[in-house]
Amino acid sequence: MTDPANRLRTGAQILWEALHREGVEVVFGYPGGAIMPAYDALLESPVKHVLVRHEQGAAHMADGYARASGKVGVAVATSGPGATNLVTGIATAMLDSVPMVCITGQVSSRVIGTDAFQETDITGVTLPITKHNYLVTHVDQIASTIREAFYVARSGRPGPVLVDITKDAQQAKTEPVYSEEPVRLRGYRPDHRAPREDLAKAAAMIDAAKRPVILAGHGIVKAEATALLGEFVAKTGIPVASTLLGLGGFPASHELALGMMGMHGEAWVNKAIQEADLLVALGMRFDDRVTGNLETYAVNAKKIHCELDPAEINKNVRVDLALVGDVKDTLASLLTLTTKTVRHGWLDRIGSLKGDSAVRDIQQMPHQDRLFAAHVMHDLWRITEGKALVVSDVGQHQMWEAQYYKHDYPRKLITSGGLGTMGFALPAAIGARFAKPDEEIWVVVGDGGFQMTACELSTAAQEGIKLNIAIINNGYLGMVRQWQQFFYDGRYSETPLRSPDFVKLAEAHGLTGLRVTKRDEVEGAVAQARATPGVVVIDFRVEQEDSVYPMVPAGADLHDMIRRPSPIVETAADE
Ligand SMILES: Cc1ncc(C[n+]2csc(CCOP(=O)(O)OP(=O)(O)O)c2C)c(N)n1
């Protein structure tokens, strides 16, 4: 019999043991007063800690780790400013349904509510941007709360969960109890299954449709439903349009892959959606960036919405049939219920919608030694054979990446879709590196977004990890500049951007920096980056005032696109 006193553990020790039991191998964090007991106990834990330079980086790293691995990512911060610095990262994960657990230290329970040093009501602050959050004030609650937090984060529609633990709860001792029972929470039903009769109705609608389009979203990737979607498409012959976060959920090289839909989607994809008589939405949420004006959105189409979260049904677009459940289960059922179909007429029509898109493509235009971002993306795709994991930031470069890096595989594109968080890419890529130690990873980032979290270069250097960073440097906050060009009479208000010498910045961190100014230098630089250990930063000096085409102006009809001017003929009908 062990002496009961020997079985006592501090809350801090219990925290790490509970994380370890959840399978956590790595956490991303930053210490401070209210979380110091946990950091002290960390020294005896097998869990690896990555010291970030700013807590926003910790949240994005946990997010990138989660997206790359499919597991729950973990970020740790102290109370007050440490916790509030996590907020942007938590909101980013919330909008993209990323499973994440954030652990924050809180002031001692007896001073809560007194405006104690570094006290912030972080559960209050994060209430609208977490799937759930907890304030833990007693040591006995720690093990069970961590277990519950992981369950909530990963079950149903995933999302971020915050656990705020007071300093006294971390310091107090108790005899820990680690439950092995499945977690059950009153009022929380994450698992849904579409009723058999609705599945049959959907199959009949699919069989009867003449001009159907599948809208494939992030849910396909999250549910690991790529293979099933492939089988479903092979059987039903329905072409697939993807959301930004759905890219890779269906191979871009497939003959029935249409490409990306929405604001910067291909013109023929949006036109096909507008001409469709049936939309089969799979794990997507009809975000305003993909629908444009709701009044005129796919008015001729019946809509089937396959979605895990009932709250999404009829939120933006009124649908004819909702199949609430795991998209993988839904697809498996639909696969057995639908009939083998070939749709030559509809595919020919979509082919004709492509019209002169090819000649409007920047790839087809003479570049006369100018370096376009699209060239960089195209070359990167070609050289890496489309197999790299790309972590893109937010702005024009993000859209060019989506258009020109053709994703054939799931979980190979990580980007902030819903919140559009600049500064996401570098830290998210660091997180992804811990999930995928052997994959080729490229960060694609603008000169603006890079400067938001460039401090994490230091984290990458300290960890000695391999990353390639392509800065698409156009000297502007490019996407905002583009909007100013199109919609504000070209009045460039606060978008020209001065940057440090990125090559020297890399070198100052003991990393490798390269600069590329011409297209024929791209290949050599990419090859050098791939062959060089550690972090390589490439400063791609691209065309400064190029724009992303096509573009559906915010709130405009989906078919009402601004197109890249055609070098051959400009037809009014296309504008
Ligand atoms: C944190 C944050 N602040 C502001 C914005 C608004 N915003 C969207 S794109 C963009 C410009 C991005 O510039 P850059 O990083 O240089 O990339 P580019 O568009 O030039 O490729 C801005 C300011 C944002 N998305 N995120």
Image (spheres, grey):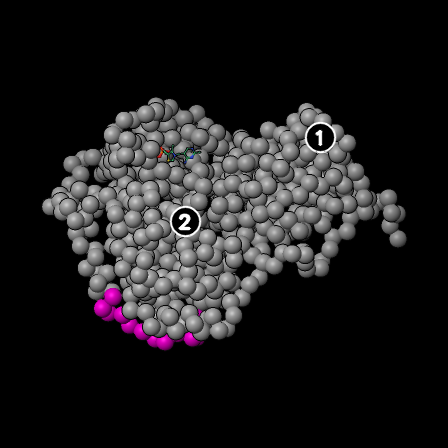
Q: Residue at x 28, y 44 (%)?
A: 551
Dividing the image into four quarters, tell me where ligand 1 lies: top left
Q: Position of residue 411 (x, y in %)?
A: 44, 52
Query: Residue at label 2?
Result: 287
The answer to whether 381 appears left or right of 429 in the picture is left
In percent of width and height, residue 331 lies at 45, 67
The part of the image, by quadrant, that contains residue 122 is: top right
Query: Residue 353's mark?
Result: none
Question: Residue sitting at 58 percent across and 39 percent down?
Answer: 126
Q: Is mark 2 within 8 Å of ligand 1?
A: no
Q: Quarter holding the C terminus? A: top left
Please determine whether, in this image, residue 148 is positioned above or below residue 341: above
What residue is shown at x 27% (from left), y 60% (from top)?
A: 275
At horizontal 41% and vertical 55% (from top left) the residue drawn is 317
Instruction: Give how far across and how far down residue 555 sits, in percent.
Output: 33, 44
Residue 206 counted in the magenta span: no
Amino acid at circle 2: Asp
Q: Any atom of ligand 1 within 8 Å of the CB at mark 1?
A: no
Which residue is under mark 1?
Answer: 113
Image coordinates for residue 490, horizontal then vertical, percent = 25, 29
Residue type of the residue flagged with mark 1 = Gly
Residue 231 visible, this angle: no
Above or below for 86 versus 158: above
Of residues 257 and 44, which is closer to you in this image?
257
Q: Indicate which disc, 2 or 1, sits on the residue closer to the N terminus.
A: 1
Numbered disc 1: secondary structure: loop
First to last magenta residue range? 333-346
Q: In this rendering, does residue 340 appear at all?
A: yes
* Element class at badge 2: loop
Query: Label 2 neighbourhood size at 10 Å, few (<14), some (14-19), many (20+)?
Result: some
In front of the other: 265 or 105? 265
